[in-house]
Image (tube, rainbow, N blue to C red):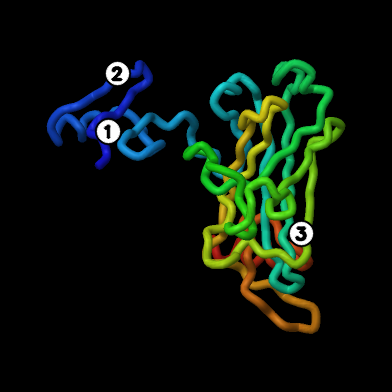
Amino acid sequence: MLSSGCRGSGGNERTGTAALLALALASCVCVCVAEGQFEPAKVAASGGRWMSMQGFETYNFTGSCHIWHDPCTNAVHIENEMATGRQGIEPQASHLNMTGHAHSETCAQGAGGHWKIDMGKSAQDENNELWVVLMKETTKTSKTWPGTTIYVNNHPPPRSFVYHAPSGAKMACCDFTYVNPKPTFTCAGGGQKGGGAAHPDVATGSHEEVKEMVEKQQS
């Protein structure tokens, strides 16, 4: 069973009756981090924009993350744009490229582990993950995975993208904002398929057409 305690910023446990529990939950935003306990969320939802993870709160990450699946060519594409004053991230980090992965949970949930195309394969298989390197000389990067989908075997699509510090710690996180209802892609030859765009600003191939469709759906 879950504990009736909610640990606030000072680390004190609040316990007691259902009324006290309700008061405690109202006074701090909590997420379940392990069976039997609740702890306050360390970060706020990023809503498609980059944000700092715990331990990197002083760094000013700006930019956005985009992911989409093109059902016409069956390819997944990720495009990230991020800027920050990198000199203070970690020793020598400003001289390194940053590697990031699509993750299974939202930023507010700590991002979880690396999202895997095939959940049955090893987590160490880079060919089974969606990863993108941000070169130190640039602020924008993208990568395409042909013959791949983010809707695999009925398991949830990736929820966020995380760039890691040289130590491996989660440094910057960005939530993917999925479009619902999904837009329609116009495929070559005049056919149409239901799209898997995860952000209203981007889509493979017929970019402007899909963007216009999404804007109409949201108006």
The reply to whether dot 2 and dot 3 touch (C-beta < 8 Å) is no
Which element type, helix, strand or loop, lies under badge 3? strand
Looking at the image, is mark 1 or mark 2 earlier in the sequence?
2
Element class at badge 2: loop
Left or right position of 207 against 11: right
In front: 70, or 190? 70
Give whichever of 18, 82 is nearer the camera.
18
Residue in view at x 62 percent, y 60 percent = 118
Where does the image place residue 119, in percent across and percent down from the top left?
58, 57
The residue type indicated by label 3 comes to Trp
Q: Which mark is in front, 1 or 2?
A: 2
Q: CA distance from mark 1 to mark 2?
A: 13 Å
| Residue at the spot of label 3 | 145
The amino acid marked with disc number 2 is Asn
Circle 2 packing at 10 Å, graded few (<14), some (14-19), many (20+), is few
Residue occupied by mark 2? 12
- Quarter of the picture containing the N terminus is top left
Q: Are marks 3 and 1 in contact (CB under 8 Å)?
A: no
Residue 55 vs 136, above or below: the answer is above
Quarter location, residue 88: top right
Looking at the image, is 126 positioned above or below residue 120?
Answer: above
Q: Examine the rendering and report whether any part of residue 196 can be seen.
A: yes
10 Å crowding of disc 1: few (<14), some (14-19), many (20+):
some
Tell me which corner region of the image, top left, top right, bottom left or bottom right, holds residue 117.
bottom right
The residue identified by callout 1 is 25
Disc 1 element: helix
Name the N-terminal-most of marks 3 and 1: 1
Structural distance between the alpha carbons of marks 3 and 1: 42 Å
